[in-house]
Image: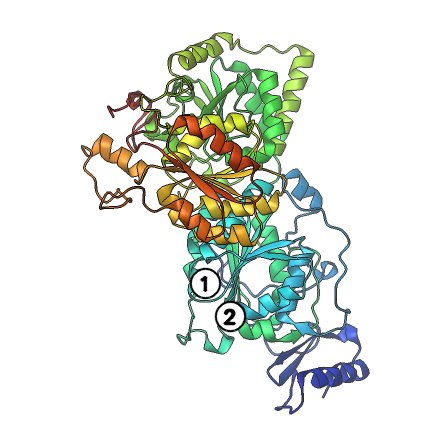
């Protein structure tokens, strides 16, 4: 039978798993050379042996799997989110030497030129002998180790139990046990955003998997590299409404960069290799891998690929010299240029700074791009958009050249599209071709990673300087912008402007925090007024110190993402600046902070309201309150008592009402080892200014506060 080209399926075997595997291994060693045997799968007590692909096999794909792959797609993204057909064959497990030449494989050099951030890998030493059988769950965990993963965020359940058992056998990987699956995926996002590495989270089937959905959508919109692994009910129960079964692949199809249902144990190594490559290359994004429980339990001898194997998936090459010569020409001719820099330029911070040093062009940054260029630099115009500075929005409105690098012209930046940068020639550089001309037409467009593109642009400008090539004078333009900065500073830029009752203005609180941390903390936020105030009043001079939910605007993001940041950068001071409404959505993660010894500091700007919605009610709905008060309806003091809640999680904390108390409270918070909660009571009447109403333009800017 072992010599036959037909897969062997044994009858029920009445022996222990250990003795059976020992017998099987010895039989295989005698009957067939290892080079001729791809793998052995044990399902309960049934066994099937698969010959190598050059044997005569049943009509399946090369890995012996059913031909079925599920792929996510959003807005028909040309290069990255629709790179596969929905019915491609399941992933091939051939080794590097066996990959056909027509397959597109990205080299390490190409990854480096595209600005991909990857961990440095030492030579991997497996815990298993090359011919040793092991469970699919152990193969999965080793595949993660081979990708350099040393930290995951995972919550166990019935369909993922095998994975967690495998994690106990993998000392290289630490699991941070968040108390909710949404907490774990937000933590994985925080880890990825502040480190540049791929974040990994694991959940069980059914509600465990669906609890990841908000985080997956959040990661897609903010281009965060994640690999999300979900357990699934056994293969034979899929589609039969089994306990805790949900079709998570179909649910997440439109909010993932790629997803895959594993149909046989042999494909796990290649699927994981592909998942990490897809997540981190090109425009980063989330990848979901769904693994049925029986696949996790099957026994196999894995074949470890060294390269991703993805037919049809390509990453744009770096910009050409011809591309950047056109950009350089536009800069030479421009008298009123402005740089508009977003999250796609975070890894090009050095190149952006060199470009500004060479040209003197002022820089406005998006919410996702803060820190790409030092916000304390004289050329920084801080944030642009709905709650951006007046002088940044003025510069965009009057510019004759808009250099848009790593941005997507979203509505919170542009407002009324036809009025946005209406006098400017637009140069758009982005790695995702789907973003080019999607919202705003660009006269010059370059599909490339920003880092190599700007590096080449700097080289061309250096050659200009060496040859004495003339550039249009920009001094008058810079002086014009500085005059706007003088006329329209942020409303509360002076710490002496205090309320008469000695209370705390949130803008002042954040300015003081910035001074006391020297602007060096890693800041995470929830979503709302506190998020905008943090962006305005805690300037960042380095990239990846600002972690927030931008595109999706997910409340509850702040605390769990701070856990991920603290795990990724244990020597950094990590502070979650949050609102009371947002903080409540994932307050259970205080338990994780204490249990996992993650020294996250939580600063709550507590106004007992959903502050941003209140602001819109004040401005556009005559202050009519529509369920935006979240305090005690009986009026008996501050509700809930966050300090007492924190104590229940063994996290120390305190509450402050007066400005005079705040500095001392910050000192205690920053000097206390471990997590800490500081509840700062602020007035709910305070608004985030300036403000451009949704769908408005620069001409509609609101700068006047309402009467308290």
Q: Measuring from the top left, give residue 580's x and y in whole percent.
A: 37, 42
- Asked if residue 241 is positioned above or below residue 589 in the image, the reply reads below
State yes or no: discs 2 and 1 in contact (Cβ < 8 Å): yes
Residue 247 lies in quadrant: bottom left
Front residue of 65/505: it is 505
Q: CA distance from mark 2 to mark 1?
A: 10 Å
Above or below, comparing residue 468 to residue 565 in the picture: above
Looking at the figure, which quarter contains the C terminus? top left
Q: Which residue is located at x 78 percent, y 83 percent? A: 26
The vertical placement of 476 against 667, above or below, is above
Nearest the camera: 448 or 118?
A: 118
Taking 172 as reference, is 369 left or right? Answer: left
Secondary-structure class at tag 2: helix
Query: Is 667 positioned to the left or the right of 30 in the image?
Result: left
Pointer 2 or 1: first along the chain: 2
Residue 433 seen anywhere in this rendered image of the structure: yes
Which residue matches tag 2? 159
Q: Which residue in the structure is indicated by mark 1? A: 208
In percent of the image, x 60 and y 45: which residue is there? 568
- Count of picture labels: 2
Secondary structure at badge 1 equals helix
Local packing at callout 2 (Cα closer than 10 Å; few below 14, some 14-19, many 20+) is: many
Frontmost residue, 578 versus 338: 578
Residue 593, horizontal then vertical, whole percent: 53, 50
Q: Residue 573's x, y, as percent?
A: 57, 37
Image-quadrant location for residue 544 = top right
Q: Residues within 10 Å of mark 1 (few under 14, many from 20)?
A: many
């Amino acid at each position: 039978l072992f010599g036959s080209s037909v897969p062997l399926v044994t009858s029920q075997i009445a022996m222990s798993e250990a003795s059976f595997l020992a017998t099987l291994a010895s039989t295989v060693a005698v009957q067939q050379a290892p080079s001729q045997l791809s793998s052995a799968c044990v399902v309960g007590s049934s066994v099937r042996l698969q010959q190598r692909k050059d044997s005569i096999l049943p009509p399946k794909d090369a890995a012996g799997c059913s031909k079925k792959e599920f792929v996510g797609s959003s807005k028909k993204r040309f290069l990255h989110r629709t790179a596969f057909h929905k019915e491609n064959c399941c992933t091939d497990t051939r080794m590097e030497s066996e990959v056909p030449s027509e397959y597109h494989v990205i080299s390490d050099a190409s990854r480096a030129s595209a600005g991909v951030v990857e961990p440095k890998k030492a030579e991997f030493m497996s815990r298993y002998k090359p011919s040793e059988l092991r469970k699919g769950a152990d193969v999965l965990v080793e595949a993660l180790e081979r990708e350099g993963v040393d930290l995951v965020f995972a919550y166990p359940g019935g369909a993922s139990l095998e994975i967690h058992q495998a994690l106990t056998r993998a000392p290289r990987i630490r699991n941070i046990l968040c108390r909710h699956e949404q907490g774990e995926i937000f933590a994985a996002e925080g880890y990825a955003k502040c480190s540049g590495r791929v974040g990994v989270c694991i959940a069980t089937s059914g509600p465990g998997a669906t609890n990841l959905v908000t985080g997956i959508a959040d990661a897609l919109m903010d281009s965060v590299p994640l690999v999300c692994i979900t357990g699934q009910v056994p293969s034979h129960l899929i589609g039969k409404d089994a306990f805790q079964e949900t079709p998570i692949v179909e649910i997440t199809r439109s909010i993932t960069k790629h997803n895959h249902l594993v149909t046989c144990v042999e494909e796990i190594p290649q699927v994981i290799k592909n998942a990490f490559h897809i997540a981190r290359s090109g425009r980063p994004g989330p990848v979901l891998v769904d693994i049925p429980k029986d696949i996790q339990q099957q026994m196999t001898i894995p074949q470890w690929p060294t390269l991703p194997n993805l037919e049809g998936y390509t990453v744009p090459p770096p910009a050409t010299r011809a591309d950047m010569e056109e950009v350089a020409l536009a800069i030479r001719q421009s008298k009123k240029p402005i740089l508009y820099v977003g999250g796609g330029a975070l890894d090009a911070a050095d190149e952006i700074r060199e470009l500004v040093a060479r040209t003197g062009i002022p820089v406005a940054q998006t919410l996702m791009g803060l820190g790409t260029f030092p916000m304390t630099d004289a050329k920084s115009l801080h944030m642009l958009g709905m709650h951006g500075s007046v002088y940044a929005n003025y510069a965009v409105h009057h510019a004759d050249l808009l250099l848009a690098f790593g941005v997507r012209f979203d509505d919170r930046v542009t407002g009324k599209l036809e009025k946005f940068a209406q006098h400017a020639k637009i140069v758009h550089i982005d790695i995702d071709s789907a973003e080019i001309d999607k919202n705003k037409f660009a006269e010059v467009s370059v599909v490339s990673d920003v880092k190599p593109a700007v590096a080449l642009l700097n080289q061309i400008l250096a050659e200009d300087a060496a040859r004495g090539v003339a550039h249009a004078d920009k001094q008058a333009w810079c002086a014009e912008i500085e005059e706007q900065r003088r006329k329209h500073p942020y409303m509360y830029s002076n710490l002496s402007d205090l309320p008469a009752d000695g209370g705390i203005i949130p803008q002042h609180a954040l300015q003081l925090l910035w001074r006391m941390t020297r602007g060096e903390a890693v800041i995470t936020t929830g979503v709302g007024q506190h998020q905008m105030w943090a962006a305005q009043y805690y300037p960042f001079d380095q990239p990846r110190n600002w972690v927030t939910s931008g595109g999706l605007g997910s409340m509850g993001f702040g605390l769990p993402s701070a856990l991920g940041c603290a795990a990724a950068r244990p020597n950094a001071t990590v502070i979650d600046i949050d609102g009371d409404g947002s903080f409540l959505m994932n307050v259970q993660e205080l338990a994780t902070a204490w249990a996992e010894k993650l020294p996250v500091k939580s600063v709550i700007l507590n106004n007992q309201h959903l502050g941003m919605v209140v602001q819109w009610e004040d401005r556009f709905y005559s202050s009519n309150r529509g369920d935006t008060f979240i305090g005690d309806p009986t009026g008996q003091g501050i509700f809930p008592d966050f300090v007492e809640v924190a104590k229940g999680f063994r996290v120390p904390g305190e509450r402050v009402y007066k400005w005079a108390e705040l500095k001392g409270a910050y000192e205690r918070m920053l000097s206390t080892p471990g997590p800490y909660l500081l509840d700062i009571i602020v007035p709910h009447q305070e608004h985030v200014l300036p403000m451009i109403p949704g769908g408005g333009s620069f001409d509609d800017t609101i700068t006047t506060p309402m009467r308290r």
